[in-house]
Image (cartoon, rainbow, N blue to C red):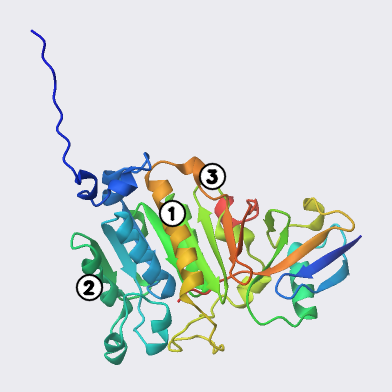
């Protein structure tokens, strides 16, 4: 007897799967992305864009740490914030956690309205990857040190006007943030290059900041996160992506490992 | 030996005498001071590398006549 298997195609099937276009990359592992525990530190301009991109990319387990509140001057670059949030001085992490559900009701964004330094020692270790969306060097160094020590990849984003960067740190193989630093970093280590104005350790004029440069830097951070979670480490940036929106040019630079760096002793 | 430092933000250049035992961060400091740069973090880029501050010039591949770039290290993001 000849048995023939039949397959009935349904017109429109390809548009019924939310992640159909992601799966078409071939390497996209929906379960790995959904189950990955991602820590985002900073809920400002970079934090907004990064959370948006993480959620749309399929991440469902996000911890978000930020102790600041929304102000009107955030609204030129922060997709989750509104006038009402600024008027009510709502905490940024809480606003993003609440509005994330509008992008996807299944996402869990756990807000922590405090400094990362105040969280328990094992907090960072509960995550598979850490994303820095910060405005100061001191907290970057904290994340860099703790993530490197725990063997957790750290993807640091930064902007300064129309210039931005993403550094990918994967212990124990790559250099870390501290390897590329010098005395100018340590001189401004405690300064917050903030948009808000509150809580600054030392007063500094506010920096220019726009959504376009921010979007590009956040997108690169999330793209690197997808590579990590999907086992594509050979495609990671080595080690630093540098973007200049003045001329719309980008480049990748090596940051050599410094054998004198305390994290590589 | 004499090298050239270029300010990536303005395109200005300055010649600088460096010794093998000078560090990269001495080049950063000297050039940032010369151009009276805004407070903030800066690094030296040489080709496709961002050089660490504690690295000596002798520990790099920088040669007489080479051009290195002073670039801002973006540390904002909120």
State the image coordinates of residue A65 (x, y, percent, origin top left). 34, 70
Residue A164 left/right relative to A55: right
What residue does disc 3 label?
A: A173
Q: Image height check: is A19 above or below A9?
A: below
Q: Nearer the viewer, residue A189 or A42?
A: A42
Callout 1: residue from which chain? A
Which image quarter: residue B42?
A: bottom right
Tag 1: Cα neighbours inside 10 Å, few (<14), some, or many (≥20)? some
How many numbered circles are shown?
3
Q: Nearer the viewer, residue A264 or A64?
A: A64
Callout 2: residue from which chain? A
Q: CA distance from mark 2 to mark 1?
A: 24 Å
Q: Is residue A29 visible?
A: yes
State the image coordinates of residue A57 (x, y, percent, origin top left). 33, 55
What residue does disc 1 label?
A: A223
Which image quarter: residue A107?
A: bottom left
Residue in view at x 22 percent, y 73 percent: A98
Which image quarter: residue A219?
A: bottom left
Q: Name the element at disc 2.
A: helix
Q: Name the element at disc 3.
A: loop
Q: Name the element at disc 1.
A: helix
Q: Nearer the viewer, residue A14 or B25?
A: A14
Q: Earlier in the sequence, mark 2 or mark 1?
A: 2
Q: Image height check: is A254 above or below A82?
A: above
Discs 2 and 1 carry the same chain letter: yes
Residue in view at x 55 percent, y 64 percent: A165
Which residue reaches farthest right? B1
What residue does disc 2 label?
A: A98
Callout 3: residue from which chain? A
Q: CA distance from mark 2 to mark 3?
A: 37 Å
Q: Earlier in the sequence, mark 2 or mark 3?
A: 2
């Amino acid at each position: 007897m000849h048995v023939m298997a039949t397959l009935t195609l349904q017109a429109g099937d390809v548009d019924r799967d939310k992640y159909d276009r992601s799966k078409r990359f071939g390497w996209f592992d929906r379960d790995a992305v959904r189950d990955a525990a991602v820590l985002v530190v900073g809920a400002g301009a970079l934090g907004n864009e990064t959370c948006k991109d993480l959620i749309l990319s399929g991440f469902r387990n996000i911890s978000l740490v930020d102790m600041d509140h929304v102000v009107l001057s955030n609204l030129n670059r922060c997709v989750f914030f509104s006038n009402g949030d600024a008027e009510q001085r709502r905490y940024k992490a809480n606003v993003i956690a609440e509005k994330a559900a509008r992008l996807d009701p299944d996402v869990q964004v756990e807000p922590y309205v405090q400094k990362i330094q105040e969280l328990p020692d094992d907090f960072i270790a509960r995550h598979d990857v850490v994303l820095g969306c910060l405005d100061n060097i001191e907290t970057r160094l904290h994340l860099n040190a703790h993530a490197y020590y725990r063997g957790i990849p750290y993807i640091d984003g930064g902007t300064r006007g129309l210039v931005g960067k993403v550094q990918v740190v994967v212990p124990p193989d790559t250099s870390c943030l501290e390897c590329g630093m010098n005395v100018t970093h340590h001189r401004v280590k405690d300064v917050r290059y903030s948009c808000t104005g509150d809580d600054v350790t030392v007063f500094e004029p506010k920096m220019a900041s726009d959504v376009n440069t921010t979007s590009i830097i956040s997108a690169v951070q999330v793209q690197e996160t997808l590579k990590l979670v999907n086992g594509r480490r050979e495609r990671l940036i080595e080690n630093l992506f540098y973007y200049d929106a003045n001329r719309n040019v980008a480049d990748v630079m090596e940051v050599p490992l410094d054998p004198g760096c305390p994290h590589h002793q | 030996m004499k090298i050239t430092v270029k300010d990536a933000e303005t395109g200005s250049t300055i010649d600088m005498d460096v010794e093998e035992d000078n560090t990269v961060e001495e080049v950063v400091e000297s050039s940032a001071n010369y151009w009276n740069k805004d407070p903030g973090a800066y690094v030296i880029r040489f080709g496709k590398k961002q050089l660490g501050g504690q690295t000596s010039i002798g520990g790099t591949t920088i040669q007489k006549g080479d051009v290195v770039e002073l670039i801002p290290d973006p540390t904002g993001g909120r």
